[in-house]
Image: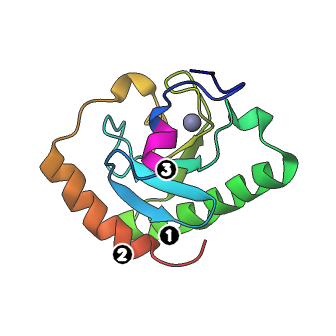
Amino acid sequence: MPRAKKAPVFCVFCEIAAGRIPSHKVWENREFVAFLDIRPVRPGHLLLVPKKHYESVFVLPGALYARTFLAARALASRMERHFRVPRVGLVVEGFGVPHAHVHLVPISREGQLNPSLAKESSPVALRRTRAGLGRALAGKA
Ligand SMILES: [Zn+2]
């Protein structure tokens, strides 16, 4: 079978974006989807992902790059209100999955963005977070 030039044969974020594998999706629009990280560093840690496959944030076309961070800003301000935290940290790391994504993490003090704090969340906790956050993020970003 011929291989796509840039997209890998299987990309978990492409599958999530297309709805072919389940996720704890909390928000989406035409070109982005946001879902909970199943290994959050803090409760409410989400991933904002363009639906189209690009290997990393820094290869996004300029306009899409700009819209990524505008969407991140809109989601972050709603997350701050929802989680009653002074900040939502934004991390671009990209080691885990080679599909452009940004991490948005509700934080209340320094040091809480450390990836070594990531741990598997229970499905019950993820469903509870998703229900509340999904309502808080509903609408246009
Ligand atoms: Zn992908």
Residue 118 visible in this rendered orientation of the protein: yes
Q: Position of residue 127 (x, y in %)?
A: 21, 57
Q: Position of residue 118 (x, y in %)?
A: 34, 29
Q: Which residue is mark 3?
A: 17
First-in-chain label (1 vs 2):
1
Indicate the amino acid at tag 2: Arg
Question: Could you tell me which residue is drawn at 64 percent across and 61 percent down?
Answer: 71
Asked if the residue at tag 1 contacts the one at tag 3, i.e. Cβ–Cβ closer than 8 Å, the answer is: no
Q: For the C terminus, give its image quadrant.
A: bottom right
- Camera-side residue: 103 or 32? 32
Instruction: Please determine whether, in this image, residue 7 is positioned above or below residue 61.
Output: above
Q: Is mark 2 within 8 Å of ligand 1?
A: no
Instruction: Please determine whether, in this image, residue 63 is positioned above or below residue 114.
Output: below
Q: Which residue is mark 1?
A: 78
**Pointer 1 local density, CA inside 10 Å: few below 14, some 14–19, many at least 20:** some
Indicate the amino acid at tag 3: Ala
Question: Could you tell me which residue is drawn at 52 percent across and 56 percent down?
Answer: 33
First-in-chain label (3 vs 1):
3
> Mark 3 and mark 1: span between their CA atoms?
22 Å
In terms of secondary structure, where does tag 2 sit?
helix
Instruction: Please determine whether, in this image, residue 116 is positioned above or below residue 125.
Output: above
Left or right placement of residue 4 versus residue 35 in this view: right
Q: For the N terminus, give its image quadrant.
A: top right
Q: Is mark 3 within 8 Å of ligand 1?
A: yes
Q: Position of residue 114 (x, y in %)?
A: 45, 28
In terms of secondary structure, where does tag 3 sit?
helix
- Camera-side residue: 8 or 29? 8
Q: Which residue is mark 2?
A: 135
> Mark 1 and mark 2: span between their CA atoms?
10 Å
Per the rendered image, the range of residues in magenta is 13-17
Left or right placement of residue 118 versus residue 70 in this view: left
